[in-house]
Image (cartoon, rainbow, N blue to C red):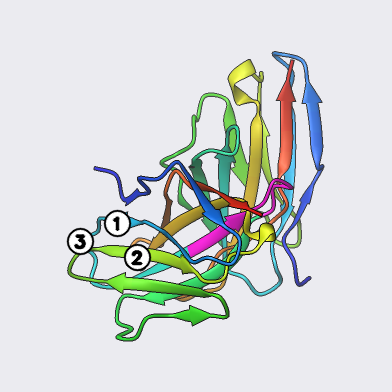
Amino acid sequence: AQKITQTQPGMFVQEKEAVTLDCTYDTSDQSYGLFWYKQPSSGEMIFLIYQGSYDEQNATEGRYSLNFQKARKSANLVISASQLGDSAMYFCAMREYNFNKFYFGSGTKLNVKP
Amino acid sequence: GEEVAQTPKHLVRGEGQKAKLYCAPIKGHSYVFWYQQVLKNEFKFLISFQNENVFDETGMPKERFSAKCLPNSPCSLEIQATKLEDSAVYFCASSQQGGDEKLFFGSGTQLSVL
């Protein structure tokens, strides 16, 4: 079974609107972390946001928030007020603490339209 | 250093030649991970180290790939007898000890096998 599933290969959003990128995960570990990374066309991997499995509140970092629904095993990224510079690939990732393994989803390519 | 340093940025090899990639993790980080990314798609896990010890090598095609992390030296990933399908960006990432620690990525090495 896939550990991280991103079902949206590509998304479009209008500038200044909000967008949600979906991510579901599969683990039997009680302790894990969920991460989102951005990869612009230049190729570098930029960390955006982190959510721990025991965190009760959704994580927020500026315009990024993580909608964490533990029972549904989902960790969706919400980007508010999209900007042209948000156009990039976005990867959801999970770290299983017990085995110290990181798993990545297949990514979602976000295009922000002016 | 405060960033993961990967060299070289680009590497071109003829099929059958050897390729060697280097990675200097952030000072103080205990874990080093190597990933292969083909065409900006999924991150394929290759190997991880805890300090100089191999932690997990389940992703390594062992017949041609090898990796080391020796004390006081950059980590290395070596591919003997490269094949066309080895063409990819190879990312090195490091993290601190601790389950909630994110991966810090290097800028990657683009390997082109001709």
Q: What stretch is highlighted in magenta?
A: A36-44
Q: Name the residue under label 3.
A: A28
Q: Name the residue under label 2.
A: A75
Q: Mark 3 lies on which chain?
A: A
Residue A64 located left or right of residue B88:
left
Tell me the kind of residue under disc 3: Ser
Instruction: Identify the residue at horizontal 44%, vertical 57% (top origin).
Output: A92
Residue A80 placed where, x, y %? 52, 71
Q: Name the residue under label 1.
A: A25
Q: Is residue B99 visible?
A: no
Mark 3 nearby-residue class (10 Å; few <14, some 14–19, many ≥20): few
In the rendered image, which quarter contains the N terminus of chain B?
bottom right
Residue B66 placed where, x, y %? 59, 36
Residue A113 placed where, x, y %? 62, 51
Instruction: Identify the residue at horizontal 81%, vertical 36% (top origin).
Output: B10
Tell me the kind of residue under disc 2: Ala
Mark 1 nearby-residue class (10 Å; few <14, some 14–19, many ≥20): many
Task: Tell me the CA gap for discs 2 and 1.
Answer: 8 Å
Residue B59 located left or right of residue B96:
left
